[in-house]
Image (spheres, rainbow, N blue to C red):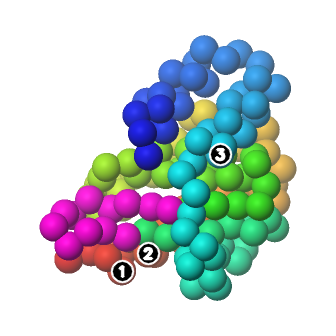
Amino acid sequence: MNEELQYSYVTEAFQFLQDWETRYQFIEDMGRKLPPMDEQYKISEYQVHACMSMVWIKAFKTEDSNIIYFQGDSDTSTIKGIVAILMSMYYEKTAAEILKIDADEKFSELQLFDHLSPTRHVGVYAMVEHARNQVKGLQC
């Protein structure tokens, strides 16, 4: 993930983009910029089953670092963009730092929940819990 996919970039863009049609386009662009997920991880273990869309999120870390990295994907462009925004919140952070983040609050600050259907809101919450559960499993 590059600098363009860091959370500060997302918040700055949302402040600049005033209308939701343009923000949705930005969210879809975020999804297109998300590095492709390795096909070997598109399995049930990494699938977020509570989502209506097909969504996969995998957390991992290298042996020489405490930084958690993610791969993610979805079959819909908007949801893939939301996966990218979630990953931007966790970018270059340790497990302890990630587990302190209130992703629901951050999505609310972006006013995403005001513009997503209740079903999609449930799916976003499931993505956050799925990622957090994997991070807990990676803690030292």
| Mark 3–mark 1 distance (CA, rounded to whole Å) | 26 Å
**Callout 2–callout 1 Cβ contact below 8 Å:** yes
Residue behind mark 1 = 137
- Residue type marked 2: Gln
Looking at marks 3 and 1 on the same chain, the residue that comes earlier in the sequence is marked by 3
Mark 3 vs mark 1, foreground winner is 3
Badge 1, how many Cα within 10 Å: few under 14, some, many 20+? few
Q: Which residues are magenta?
A: 60-71
Residue behind mark 3 = 31
**What x and y, as percent, mark residue 127?**
60, 64
Q: Residue furthest bottom?
A: 44
Residue 134 image label? 2
Up/down of 25 relative to 76, above or below = above
In-image side of 126 versus 23 (left or right): left
Q: Secondary structure at mark 2?
A: helix
In-image side of 96 versus 103 (left or right): left
In which quadrant will I find the C terminus?
A: bottom left
In-image side of 40 versus 49 (left or right): left
User: Which residue is rendered at x = 82% and y = 26% of the image?
Assistant: 21
**Callout 2–callout 3 Cβ contact below 8 Å:** no
**What x and y, as percent, mark residue 62?**
26, 69
- Residue type marked 3: Gly
